[in-house]
Amino acid sequence: MNRRSLLHTLALSPLATLPAFAEEASAKAVTVDGLEVFRVKANYKPKVLYSHNWVIVRLKTNCGLTGLGEASQSGDDAKVLGYLKKYAALMQGRSIYDIEWLRSAVSSDIFGAGTSGANDEQETASAICAFAALEHALWDIRGKALGVPCHAFFGGNVHPQGLRQYANINRGVRERTPEGFAKMAAEAVAAGMTAIKLAPFDEIPLGNTDPAAFEPHIAEGIARATAVRQAIGPRVSLSVDCHSRLTLPLGLELLKRLEPLNLYWIEEVTPPDPARIGQNANAPGETYANLAAIHKAATMKTAGGEDLRGVQGFFPYIAADAATVYMPDIKRCGGMLEMKKIAAMAEGAGRLVSPHGPASPVGNVIGGQVMTTAPNFNILEMSYDENPWRAELISPPEDLSSGSLHLSDRPGHGITLNEAVAQKYAATSMD
């Protein structure tokens, strides 16, 4: 683009209204100049695996443009706040285009740990969520600077009809009885959702290895899933997430016991390594043989990968043919560009991609900006009925008509944070 064309583009973009830009200015002159963090209490439940707070960032620039990102569900809000400050300081005064530079600068934090125990993994999870949130915000600012939606940077919208969503009812359900799950699922279908997911086996104790101790929880989980299927009928898609709680033998048996429910998919039945029962994180170097065995035996689709980090984490997972549907999380996989790379790897393997994302509407829209450019996109996740004010947090609110997320062509992510709502429901603790 020559200078005349660039100035014409800027004249049509939000930058044209900003006094900090003289006639000679270009979008390249936009630099990072500060960070705001909003922590919102999203759920009434106590912390179990992940904090139920939403951590939303707003990155500021020297010209007044801002960008939104999300760093929720790192597992430790205090740690993620520390990494956000550290990485924002690295970006201070740098161009909004330095995304790969930042990734390289913090790669030892976000990809180098996870091999020497839970503490190491928690540091890495916090670091990568912080990096991803800033990366989201940088893309948002870039879109606003050039006057285009973020999906334009990743190949353009190939799903103009919208992105189908499923209602994850696990966090919204108040009573974890078959009746409680069925009631929530029926409400979601009545609201227009065409797909439901639940995690009915979460009561299986972490670290449990006694086969006899599993059965009461497995029987209860099957009863919950059966009640949901009866409530929503045969045409609504139903998925079950096992949260890596089972052993391989019990997982293979469970596949057969769930066949009558005609599942859309079954998710993360077991961790790759039997020694890691009850742990969601997957350490580098694992073979994924257990998940591959589940996938080979399943008559329904299999899904997983929500805790894997970057292309480095997903490559061996995809190479092992561990699932039908791969689930990068826009926060925990390393951001928007990383998700696009992972989706491309899955496409090359002939597999589908469906982002993990029971988070705020900010993260939902950000994930949608990438997925609307992916030919192998399958379905998006939404944490259903986690709170009654979700629609008020961003403007405009998520367009979820007909059970799908519909993205606009507004610049960047196309949304702004309703700061008054974020402050009204601000989290007062790190849980």
Image: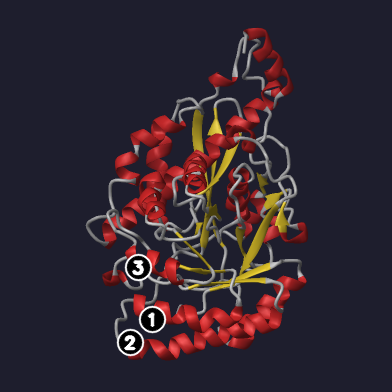
- x and y percentages locating residue 105 in the rendered image: 34, 34
Q: Are marks 1 and 2 in contact (CB under 8 Å)?
A: yes
- x and y percentages locating residue 189 in the rendered image: 73, 72
- Pick whichever of labels 1 and 2 is earlier in the sequence: 2
| Amino acid tagged 3 | Asn
- Pick whichever of labels 3 and 2 is earlier in the sequence: 2
- x and y percentages locating residue 90 in the rendered image: 38, 33
Q: Which residue is mark 1?
A: 250
* Disc sitting over residue 290 in the figure: 3
Note whether residue 174 is visible: no
Judging depth in this view, the residue of 23 and 401 nearest the camera is 401
The kind of secondary structure element at disc 3 is helix
Q: Which residue is mark 2?
A: 211
Crowd around label 1: few <14 · some 14–19 · many ≥20 (10 Å)? some
* Disc sitting over residue 151 in the figure: none
Residue sitting at the far left: 116
The kind of secondary structure element at disc 1 is helix
Judging depth in this view, the residue of 298 and 418 nearest the camera is 298
Side (left or right) of 421 relative to 342: right
Crowd around label 2: few <14 · some 14–19 · many ≥20 (10 Å)? few
| Amino acid tagged 2 | Pro
- Pick whichever of labels 1 and 3 is earlier in the sequence: 1
- x and y percentages locating residue 399 in the rendered image: 74, 53
**Residue drawn at x 54%, y 39% as measured from the top left:** 137
Crowd around label 3: few <14 · some 14–19 · many ≥20 (10 Å)? many
